[in-house]
């Protein structure tokens, strides 16, 4: 028999009554979640502390240069620039709320302190103390895209170029490559869009003030384009192109940069990577070019140890990157020791070689060669780590 409305109500009343026939009180509503707890549940807090000791066997008594107030005692190195000293490379705290279909807004901010932050900011045409400590700060929006995902970011973000990044923990070696240090920018201020129709292809574009410009130094804008493909889980290939006026108060002469990186995981214990850059700019009426290639291999016999050789060649035809028309090379060998609790140590030997007596030696000598030993200690954490 089909139940009537009255019988349904009667049954519901009976089920909510006590054995004595008295109706029971309705269950209280669940308490609303604390908005602060909701914020941190959806936001990842991560960071690291990166310290190192470096010894330059040329024993330089004076720096090659000073960038952002930091003395560069080991020429052509980036961040690991001190000689015979224990140093704080970088301490970072990052907050990120990734946009999702149920909550399309997001943000990321990376707060940095240390000599690396000062060096990065030192390349800005208009550096300020506030910008020095903000590596990234942008607002994100996940736009409705039908098939795939389309994310828009507005603000300051690190560059898409190169095989390496500012954070030591995310690189294979401790010291940065010649290409990272000389051939590409660190960051951009502007807007970018990234579209992924599937998990194998990502297309991206951005418009920014230029190379390392929080504040615009001319009235022109720089455009960047990227394509990344992952045909298999073992292969990743990215191609980048950037073009725009970069000279201060000059919007007519354009700088071009082509960058590509290919990585291949041959096995769980062997990975390979190649990075190539070509750049061209105009200084007055003179065209200048630079290009270079870096080759990496990573051998990981077990979860706590890795051995990483890196070989590089940079051709600075017009002295735009190094200040001297020359070819420079470097060989790096890094031994990595990693603990599951987030602590990592890297012991590294690096040899730099130039065509000219470029490197400072002792008090006033110069040399075509430079050898250095670096020992780095890094502790990293994340609130999302299982």
Image (tube, rainbow, N blue to C red):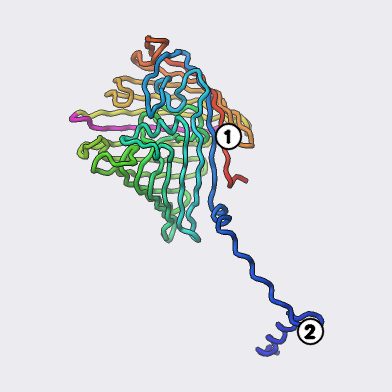
In the drawing, what numbered circle is on residue 21? 2
Q: Which residue is mark 1?
A: 379
Residue 303 vs residue 56: left or right? right
For the record, the magenta segment spans 269-285
Q: Residue at x 24, y 37 (%)?
A: 254
Q: CA distance from mark 1 to mark 2?
A: 64 Å
Q: Residue at x 28, y 40 (%)?
A: 243
Residue 110 vs residue 259: left or right? right
Q: Position of residue 19 (x, y in %)?
A: 81, 80
Q: Residue at x 37, y 17 (%)?
A: 354
Majority secondary structure of magenta residues:
strand
Number of other residues with Cα within 10 Å of mark 2, as a class: few under 14, some 14 to 19, many 20 or more: few
Q: Residue at x 33, y 37 (%)?
A: 211
Q: Position of residue 271 (x, y in %)?
A: 52, 33
Q: Of 268 and 46, which appears nearest the observer? A: 46
Q: Quadrant of residue 250?
A: top left
């Amino acid at each position: 028999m089909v139940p009537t409305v009255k019988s349904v109500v009667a049954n519901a009343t009976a089920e909510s009554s006590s054995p004595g026939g008295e109706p029971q009180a309705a269950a209280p509503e669940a308490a609303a979640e604390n908005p602060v707890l909701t914020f941190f549940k959806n936001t990842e807090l991560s960071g690291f502390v990166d310290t190192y000791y470096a010894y330059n066997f040329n024993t330089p008594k004076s720096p090659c240069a000073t960038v952002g107030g930091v003395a560069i005692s080991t020429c052509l190195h980036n961040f690991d620039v001190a000689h015979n000293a224990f140093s704080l490379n970088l301490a970072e705290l990052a907050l990120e709320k990734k946009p999702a279909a149920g909550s399309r807004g997001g943000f990321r901010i990376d707060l940095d302190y240390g000599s690396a932050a000062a060096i990065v900011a030192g390349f800005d045409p208009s550096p300020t103390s506030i910008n020095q400590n903000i590596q990234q700060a942008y607002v994100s929006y996940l736009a409705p895209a039908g098939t795939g995902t389309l994310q828009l970011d507005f603000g300051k973000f690190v560059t898409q170029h190169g095989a390496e990044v500012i954070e030591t923990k995310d690189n294979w070696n401790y010291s940065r490559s010649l290409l990272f240090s000389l051939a590409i920018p660190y960051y951009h201020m502007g807007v970018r869009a990234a579209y992924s129709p599937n998990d194998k292809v990502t297309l991206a574009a951005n418009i920014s003030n230029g190379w390392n410009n929080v504040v615009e130094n001319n009235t022109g804008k720089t455009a960047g384009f990227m394509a990344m493909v992952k045909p298999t889980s073992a292969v990743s290939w990215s191609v980048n192109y950037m073009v725009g006026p970069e000279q201060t108060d000059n919007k007519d002469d354009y700088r071009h940069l082509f960058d590509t990186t290919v990585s291949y995981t041959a096995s769980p214990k062997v990975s390979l990577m190649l990075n190539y850059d070509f750049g061209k700019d105009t200084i007055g009426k003179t065209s200048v070019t630079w290009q270079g290639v870096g080759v990496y291999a990573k051998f990981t016999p077990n979860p706590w140890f890795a051995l990483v050789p890196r070989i590089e060649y940079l051709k600075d035809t017009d002295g735009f990157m190094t200040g001297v028309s020359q070819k420079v090379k470097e060989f790096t060998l890094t031994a990595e020791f990693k603990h599951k609790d987030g602590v990592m140590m890297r012991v590294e030997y690096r040899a730099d070689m130039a065509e000219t007596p470029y490197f400072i030696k002792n008090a006033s000598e110069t040399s075509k060669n430079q050898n250095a030993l670096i020992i780095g200690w890094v502790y990293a954490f994340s609130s999302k780590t299982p």
